[in-house]
Image (cartoon, coloured by chain):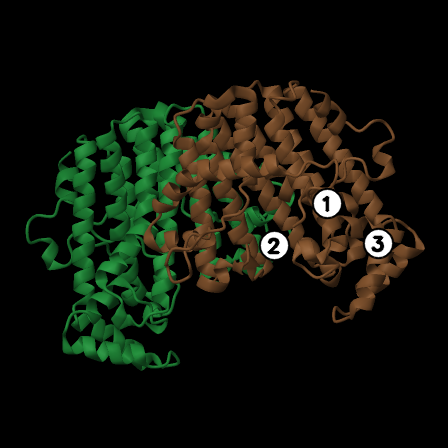
Chain colours: A brown, B green
Amino acid sequence: MTEYVTRTRPRPGEAREGERGIPSQTCGGPGVPDGQEAAAILEEARGSVDPALRAALDSLPGSLRRISRYHFGWEHADGTPAAGNAGKAIRPALVLAAATALGGPAARTAALPAAAAVELIHNFTLLHDDVMDRDTTRRHRPTAWTVFGDADAILAGDALQALALGKLAADPHPASAAATARLAACVVELCAGQRSDTAMERRGPAEVTLDEVLAMAEAKTGALLGCACALGALYAGAPEEDVEALDAFGREAGLAFQLIDDVIGIWGDPRHTGKPAGADLVARKKSLPVVAALGSGTPAATELAELYALPREQGDDDVERMTLAVERAGGREWAQEQAADRMARAMSELARAIPDPEAAGGLLSLAEFVTRRST
Amino acid sequence: MTEYVTRTRPRPGEAREGERGIPSQTCGGPGVPDGQEAAAILEEARGSVDPALRAALDSLPGSLRRISRYHFGWEHADGTPAAGNAGKAIRPALVLAAATALGGPAARTAALPAAAAVELIHNFTLLHDDVMDRDTTRRHRPTAWTVFGDADAILAGDALQALALGKLAADPHPASAAATARLAACVVELCAGQRSDTAMERRGPAEVTLDEVLAMAEAKTGALLGCACALGALYAGAPEEDVEALDAFGREAGLAFQLIDDVIGIWGDPRHTGKPAGADLVARKKSLPVVAALGSGTPAATELAELYALPREQGDDDVERMTLAVERAGGREWAQEQAADRMARAMSELARAIPDPEAAGGLLSLAEFVTRRST
């Protein structure tokens, strides 16, 4: 109980100090939960949802099944079985944790179709986003479009969306219709977020506002995390205000996650992130700390804008100068404060729907996990 | 009554004569229904379903709304209103005609959300197919991807699928869940059909079997026409066997339509088709009459295979030779017999579910329309 309140609600002024509620970039530091509870929740969710996911993919015609099974990491490109790395299962874990928190173990079991549907939607968007963004690596493997071509990756994504919404609609649970409609509305939001992202790619850093980038991050990342929590609440039979509070909890935690992910993309330790230092700066990414820095009106902002306008083939010197410029322009501090603020809002929404911290435990652990992760 | 039976069921041997049940390429010839009834049904369906479609698109965020409204022909590329050519509304007309036939005017009104959903799904597949096939013209206008780019066309398509399934799932009608699940299963089939089509494009004409092309045509064209009829039946509260019969009716009529479309692609009058004579042969399309001809084991098949292997930059001479070769190899006759056979099966399924020809009138008119159209 005490822990729930003290750990999650920053005292007035505390967030402004820039560290409170901000995750360290590594797990297991002193006084920081080591994420073991979250890891166990995620592993359990993966185990619970995988049979439904495999059954859903098995229902696809051969050609689409093969592309999808490759994307999930269950098959190699040649169709032979693979050990599988289907991702961290954060979204299905949120569905199941929300259902458990509001309805106990029976609601968790009932919500499995919703957990599977959310994971199918997530993977449909990954398949399509990789085609649009020309990303060549996903979960340490070549992306589906690089292996099977654009058309196959688009069609497999289309089929996964249909599977997700169709199977959820066919679920006899009384929350099925509302959950399907909500998940479909979330897909529209995800599409709008990806659309903003691809459109912003084509614009100069100075033409992009912080509000736009925040709205894009909420649509691209927050919406599905919020929807996952809301679906869990719907399947637990929770009243409308709790469903909305859970949605807001997931959204705010999702935005905190994105802010921290962007901080890690600049200041992350390459030993933990697996990427070179300042990878997002080298790629001239319009990440949240960068856009905040550019809009700060400081001399460092001017320097950063000049550095961002340089060609991308620069040495480590420029990465260091860009990193320092974002920091001096206040980009890091802003992002950390924002993340703390978002986490505080997330916790406040959670406490509103689930006042008992013990019941909220699973959702708390997951929210801490996603905002403290090192990769 | 008499007309229903005599016009739709070929007498034994009649189909073999090659003309019975086969549409003329122009409307209104002597003894051929002039399609006025079907035209009126289609216009009424367009009028009934458009408000729901416009409301659905209006619910999209700005960027996706604009791409979708352009695709539907309601806006120009610059966002100004356009007169609009959203297609013939055959699929929503089938939903409404099936609902009317099995449940009367009340069922027709109730089925409007299903009619809108089917049309949204159809348009989602058009947006994506055009990206994959690099088609540059749709309904006499530049395709969405040529105007907005691949990413925007993919995202608008994704959003239309979500709108279709989400709005149908949210419909309070008791058939909503079954209809949503059925439409989603149909999307998977459409994706598998498009996948076969794109995969066949990369293979030589000799490597493609007639069974494969027929299966592809059923998945790509028959499935959604069948699903449209089935959804109308579901919304009329029809028993399972009637729903399946209506699905089979739409599927068989869809295959007949495809066979005739392929015949028109070779022998169609350019004044009616708007395309040069033999356009499908110039494009080396593996259409149904061509694949049938290639597999006939005749000398004409050998000649056709040789002509198909030539580079595409040939004069009218080769088009004439290819046209003759398909005809001599029996491709035209086979396609016409198959079309007649499929139409007979369609009529038999229809008569099974709706024995009263007066009640089946709308569906009959539509089936005749799609298999007698000139463009």
The residue tagged with tag 3: helix, strand or loop?
helix
Vertical side of A147 occupied by A59: above or below: above
Q: What is the spatial separation of the Cα atoms under label 1 and label 2, in whole angstroms?
A: 39 Å
Q: What chain does mark 2 sit on?
A: B
Numbered label attached to residue A326: 3
Q: Nearer the viewer, mark 1 or mark 2?
A: 1
Q: Which residue is mark 2?
A: B77
**What's under tag 2, amino acid-wise?**
Ala
The residue at the point 69 percent across, 25 percent down is A349
Residue B183, position as x, y percentages in the image: 38, 39
**What's under tag 3, amino acid-wise?**
Val
The residue tagged with tag 2: helix, strand or loop?
loop
Q: Which residue is mark 1?
A: A260
The residue at the point 17 percent across, 36 percent down is B351
Sort mark 1 into few (<14), some (14-19) or many (20+) by Cα contacts within 10 Å: many
Residue A137, position as x, y percentages in the image: 56, 60
Sort mark 2 into few (<14), some (14-19) or many (20+) by Cα contacts within 10 Å: some
